[in-house]
Image: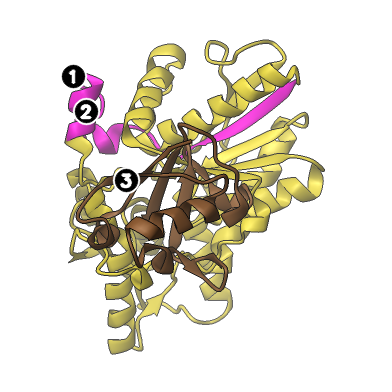
Amino acid sequence: MRYDSLVSSVGRTPLVGLPRLSPSADVRLWAKLEQNNPTGSIKDRAALWMVQDAEKRGVLSPGATVLEPTSGNTGISLAMVCSQRGYRLICVMPENTSVERRQLLTMWGAEIIFSPAAGGSNEAVAVAKRLAAEHPDWVMLYQYGNPANAQAHYETTGPEILEDLPSITHFVAGLGTTGTLMGTGRYLKEQVPGITVVAAEPRYGELVYGLRNIDEGFVPELYDPSVLTSRYSVGPREALRRTRELVTEEGIFAGISTGAILHAALAQADKAVKDGKRADIAFIVCDGGWKYLSTGAYAGTLEEAEAALEGQLWA
Amino acid sequence: MAVQVRVPTILRNYTGGSKVVEGAGETLGALFEDLDTRHAGLRGRLVADEGLHRFVNVYINDEDVRFLGGLDAKLSDGDNVTILPAVAGG
């Protein structure tokens, strides 16, 4: 397929079947390969939509400085889009994220301000909000509350999946900013009455939940629980086990958050088999595994890999 | 009828530093009341306006209780309950 530029090639990713991990001919799993996007993750969609929306609203003009709190992928996507459009990008990122993410951000021209590991992305959000207040001329796109994030998935991810899989019964994705689930989930619920929309949320080590008190907690402004049927917390052990299964059984080399999503998708498949119902379960492969090689996720025993992930923001 | 409850770091001052405590109850709400008899003040940090505190997530066997009836969610012997503060992803 031919495009005018890299930015125009965002989206329209393949949906591939999982012949080995699907339990039967009536209960099938389908992977939406978002690592096929230009910078290798699903976040290219949200980044492009947020930048285009800000341009349309007249908030962004050439030479502007964009600021964003991000644990990695959104920053990498924004860095590519901003470099192509002539904007300066500053990312606020927790210090406990993988070295590959930092190198990629720098390579695409972003500047990084680190926030403390304790408190995870909550702290990155707080630091970015403080910087935005100090620099009123900087534009914070704010993926957690920007409707253009969910809109990207409402306009692209949802329609793409439905076109490729009209018989879809379940949609399973990760819960971070909630943009993927809110946008895709809303679209699919409108088009497919009775569809099951499931969220898989990564459960990190204790350090990441190291808030000083409960009132420092954070729920993204985009989150609307009425879009979801259910929501599961998936720990590092299950996420790692499924990430490895996905590459050994189906040849799909994915990041660790995808393992968490596959775990939730397989639980839905089991349930369908037990209930004697047919199911076509589409789930999101958020990114490839390349950025996580240094975490040790793919080497040694599961126990060693799990120990290596302790304290890291692996999704 | 006993369930294991995992308590996050920021609430362990109510459990004498314990990471896992045991409790009982037919529902999540009843479990929190039972826990409060031994860990006074804990319930007050989890429940606000007769619902779950906005920044508290509770899971029964890894499923978010807000999709299982909230404080009315049913518990069975041997269930695992996990309490976590809501944090940002992405």
Checking the image for residue B21, the label placed there is 3
Chain letter for the residue marked with disc 2 in the picture: A
Circle nearer the N terminus (1, 2): 1
The residue shown at (54%, 35%) is B76
Magenta residues (range): A278-307
**Which residue is labeled 2 in the image?**
A305
Q: Is residue B87 visible?
A: no
Chain letter for the residue marked with disc 1 in the picture: A
In the image, which lettered chain appears brown?
A: B
- Between A85 and A308, the residue placed more toward the observer is A308
How many discs appear? 3
Real-space Cα separation, disc 1 to disc 2, in angstroms: 7 Å
- Between A64 and A183, the residue placed more toward the observer is A183
**Which residue is labeled 1 in the image?**
A300
Pointer 1 with pointer 3, Cβ within 8 A: no
Q: Quadrant of residue A307?
A: top left
Colour given to chain A in the rendered image = yellow
Packing grade of label 1 (10 A; few <14, some 14-19, many >=20) is few
